[in-house]
Image (cartoon, rainbow, N blue to C red):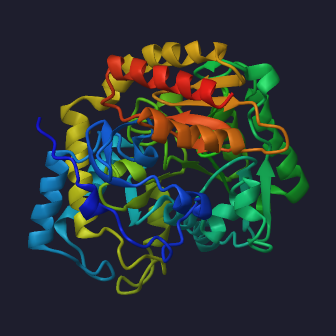
Amino acid sequence: MNIQQPRSAVATPNDLAAYWMPFTANRAFKHAPRMLAGAKDMHYFTTDGRKVLDAAAGMWCSNAGHCRTPINEAIARQAATLDYAPPFQFGHPQAFELASRIAALAPKGLDNVFFCNSGSEAVDTALKVALAYHATRGEAARTRLIGRERGYHGVGFGGISVGGMVNNRKLFGALLTGVDHLSTTYNREKQAFTKGEPEWGAHLADELERIVALHDASTIAAVIVEPMAGSTGVLVTPKGYLQKLRAICDKYGILLIFDEVITGFGRLCYPFAAERYGVVPDMITFAKGVTNGAVPMGGVLIRGDIHDTFMKGPEHVVELFHGYTYSAHPLACAAGLATLDLYREEGLFERARALEPTFADAVMELRKEPNVVDIRTVGITAGIDLAPKNNAPGLRGYEALACAFNDHDLMVRVAGDTLALTPPLIVSEAQIGEIMDKVARVIRAVA
């Protein structure tokens, strides 16, 4: 395929000052910008014409690769037909079709979909549904929400309250009241250099019993966890942990929410990680891979009987006072339908499952490189912990990010001093080898 690369004279802006970039070291970026101007399949193109291998699927989003023609064409057709439809009291066909398609991929019983526009909105939606559900059932005292240390659930006030990443929380006041946290499941001494789910750690789910004893089950609405904690550095769930958490939640009537914004749509080799682990939560949040990152979209899969609890009273009355102007946006729905078609037609979830051992073996070869203190792999995902530089946590990781992009034409994700490798599911074995070769050179360069 002939790919037209962008011309820097057209793509490079003259002034970078006005844009306050999210989750970015703004001053460092604007001193030495890493500017992207195009993308196709496994690569980005920079404004100076370089071809950069994407080992991050954009930001865990582009599971089917970049600028896929069927998705682009579906968006264009939709934009020319119906650009926007109000989601309050009106609908459009693609919204109902996409909801049905997503529900069909989910574990049995998760029959209803509430659409929003991002993972952060999906989390806040799930938390609000949990609170409203208990109140509707006459258990309004169930207001407490339980997250987990080192968890990431977006940047809404609900998400950062149940999240457990200190830098995301410390500047924003008291957050939601009545929130508690399970301990992180990660223990380097017990789990270092594990392929797949660690053997050690299932017992950490029992901490929920302690929290219940402290607060009483009658005050707890929901527990929210990621099947794999991605943004904090690829922390893989121990074997049996989610099963134990499910059993404890069932014992006390607590809702269990899986945040699958990252793990959904093939990242762990299944439509949802819930299937990989054989655990059915009460809700699943999703985003990112649902549209391949082409148009913003998020949502919540909700157990049918939870949905039905709200469907009472006069039919003309709104059942849940919640939603967004751009819920089920027509362009996002078109992108979602085309993306699901691609996943199915190209067998990308099955392909990821077959490729997982090869990917894990290749990543583990990096353990011999300098300053590598741990590697974790699951699905088509890996976290590589580098020893921090003295008195400068995160500096080695930042230097690795910049070195990979500037010197080795490679995009990676970083979380502190952890490198995260999450390539699109279309990655070839040869490209896996290329990624690992480049990452090895980057690690040596920042030693």
Q: How far from the left and from the top, in percent, is residue 423?
A: 41, 34
Q: Quadrant of the N terminus?
A: top left
**Residue 333 in which image quadrant:** bottom left
One can see residue 105 in this view: yes
Q: Across the whole image, how many numbered discs are drawn on residues?
A: 0
Q: Residue furthest right?
A: 214
Q: Quadrant of the C terminus?
A: top right
The residue shown at (82%, 41%) is 207
Q: Nearer the viewer, residue 207 or 442?
A: 442
In-image side of 334 versus 63 (left or right): left
Give above or below for 36 relative to 296: above
Q: How far from the left and from the top, in percent, is residue 195?
A: 59, 18
Give above or below for 248 relative to 350: below
One can see residue 95 in this view: no
The residue shown at (23%, 48%) is 67
**Residue 107 in which image quadrant:** top left
The residue shown at (14%, 66%) is 78
In-image side of 252 versus 359 (left or right): right
Q: Nearer the viewer, residue 404 or 133?
A: 404
Q: Nearer the viewer, residue 129 or 50?
A: 50
Q: How far from the left and from the top, in percent, is residue 95?
A: 25, 64
Give above or below for 15 relative to 270: below
Give above or below for 391 relative to 439: below
Q: How far from the left and from the top, in percent, is residue 248?
A: 72, 41
